[in-house]
Image (spheres, rainbow, N blue to C red):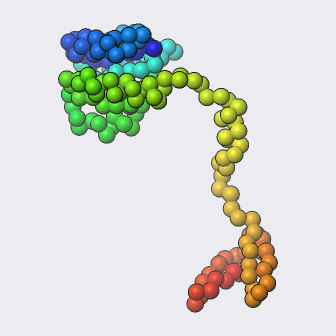
Amino acid sequence: MNILIIEDEYHAAKRLQALVKQFLPEAKIEEVIDSVEWAVERFGNENHPDLVFMDIQLSDGISFSIFEQTEVKAPVIFTTAFDQYSLKAFKVNSIDYLLKPIDEDELRAALKKYKDLYANNDKPDVSDLSSILKNLSLGKKYKERFLLKKGSEYSFLLSDDIAYFFSEDSISFVM
């Protein structure tokens, strides 16, 4: 598993690296990025990490501007001292939102959530997707006919033959 850390505080980045290595010894921390500009450049290449830890307040701005400038294809766990951005965080690729100083149990839970959601790392089977798409109606499908009761007799009326419905005195009519 390849992990990218976007954090501009040296000690916070080092502590996060140590905690991630403690809970995910198999993980490889690709690099630590400390700015929006560098992160945008990093996400511009084809090699995307499996998971991103991202601080919100970086040396050159707010990390949400990264999402406005480039496509982030990896899930994100936000790590920040600011709780006012939590709702905005979940509008992007966020898995969790951890407040600093990062609590070990909260980090462990966030990593478990990541594993539960992404651990299989299986690409969806295209044949499964195409069968799902075949079964989905992309346009609305309307009734083609209606069953009518007149007295004790039943008959069908085609939708194309109906101009409108109306109701009067708890009785429905079709014209």
Give the image quarter of residue 159: bottom right
In percent of width and height, residue 48 lies at 47, 17
In percent of width and height, residue 84 lies at 23, 37
Give the image quarter of residue 91: top left
Asked whether 89 or 17 is in front, the reply is 17
Q: From what the image shows, is residue 145 above or below residue 15?
A: below
In percent of width and height, residue 129 lies at 66, 35
Asked whether 123 or 80 is in front, the reply is 123
- Would residue 148 be found to the left or right of residue 41 on screen? right
Q: Is residue 85 visible?
A: yes
Q: From what the image shows, is residue 73 above or below residue 169?
A: above
User: Residue placed at 53% from the left, 23% from the top?
Assistant: 120
In percent of width and height, residue 104 lies at 26, 22
Give the image quarter of residue 81: top left
Q: Is residue 61 visible?
A: no
Asked whether 118 or 14 is in front, the reply is 118
Q: From what the image shows, is residue 172 above or below residue 101?
A: below
- Would residue 104 be found to the left or right of residue 171 on screen? left
Number of disc labels = 0
User: Residue placed at 71% from the left, 31% from the top?
Assistant: 127
For the N terminus, give its image quadrant: top left
User: Residue placed at 65% from the left, 56% from the top?
Assistant: 140
For the C terminus, give its image quadrant: bottom right
